[in-house]
Image (cartoon, helix red, strand yellow):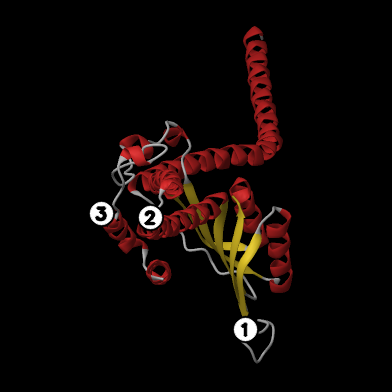
Amino acid sequence: MKRMKKILLALLVMALLLTTACGSGSEKSASATEAVYDKVEYPAEEEWAEPLPTAEPSLTEEDFQVTGAVETNRKLIRSASMTLETLHFDQTIADVTALVSRLGGYMESTRIEGESAYSSYSNERSAEFIARVPVSSFDTVQEELAQFGSVRERSENAEDVTDQYYDVQAELDALKIQQERLLTMMEQADKMEDLIALEEALTNVRTRINERTSAIRRYDGLIEYATIRLSINEVVEYSERIEKPATFGQRIAETFKGSLDFIRAFGETIVLGIVAVGPFVLVYGGGIALVVVIVLLCVRAGKRRKKAAGNSEEKK
């Protein structure tokens, strides 16, 4: 009868410990696990079919080693933002949705507000999208989105989470090793208090495994699918682009180019002037030259006649 009471009491304690373990956080789990193993009393080795570890199944440095693949397989979270102006709001919204779907992505969130810009009693419409697209289509999506209107703003970012990713992965692998060791110890334990302690430790380890597994899944989702934040504004006409101030080097290049353009334009003007005056010079210059020739011939002929008259008088 007393033995039955002890068993019932032990079962009650086990239930209370399991309930407490399920509600404890991951930060408390490490210290709880150490306390549990400090309480466990292991029998002598000869009482076991196989020797049971006499200490907490601690993890060695080898359990946390990460292979050389980390150095080459970088984990990048890519994102971009873009602001568009469009004259055809409804068509642009349809084109954006179709583009994201065609390239294997999906809309994480959508918000549209306002009325048509062409209505006299309403404000211009606008839309906000957060799209998730496969990272392989990230650049293609941005290039095609830019064709749907006038790009006002555009930015792109890549966050390297390689170290964080593989740290979590190493912790997960180590926790799985610890879980296997705990299961082995539970198979070998024959005392109720040992089973209770091991069960509590196993619960804490499994909680931490679930947390690391969820973190890896979140990282994978962010790495495999890039995020694009798109703002679309309806306008009646496109806004003027605000150019960035030119640098000193750009101003020098523009000044030099302007000088060359002036010299070329001046030379072209001179050539065109010569070409334009040429026909007049040929026509009027030829006429003047002809008159001069005739005058010279007449003068020469007059001189010859005078000379001939003088000679005839001398002979007389």
Asked whether residue 88 appears in the rendered view, the answer is: yes
Secondary element at tag 1: loop
Quickly name the residue at label 2. 191
Q: Amino acid at mark 1?
A: Gly
Q: Please tell me which of labels 3 and 2 falls first in the chain.
A: 3
In the picture, measured across the screen, residue 145 lies left or right of residue 219, that is: right
Q: Amino acid at mark 3?
A: Asp
Q: Amino acid at mark 2?
A: Lys
Quadrant of the image occupied by residue 36: bottom left
Q: Please tell me which of labels 1 and 2 falls first in the chain.
A: 1
**Residue 278 coordinates in the image, percent (x, y):** 66, 36
Nearer to the camera, 213 or 111: 213
Tell me if mark 1 has few (under 14), some (14-19) or many (20+) residues whose alpha carbon lies within 10 angstroms of its own. Answer: few
Q: Please tell me which of labels 1 and 3 falls first in the chain.
A: 3
Quadrant of the image occupied by residue 120: bottom right
Tell me if mark 3 has few (under 14), some (14-19) or many (20+) residues whose alpha carbon lies within 10 angstroms of its own. Answer: few
Quickly name the residue at label 3. 38
Quickly name the residue at label 1. 114
**Disc ID at residue 55:** none
* Quarter containing the C terminus: top right
* Residue 135 position (above or below residue 116): above
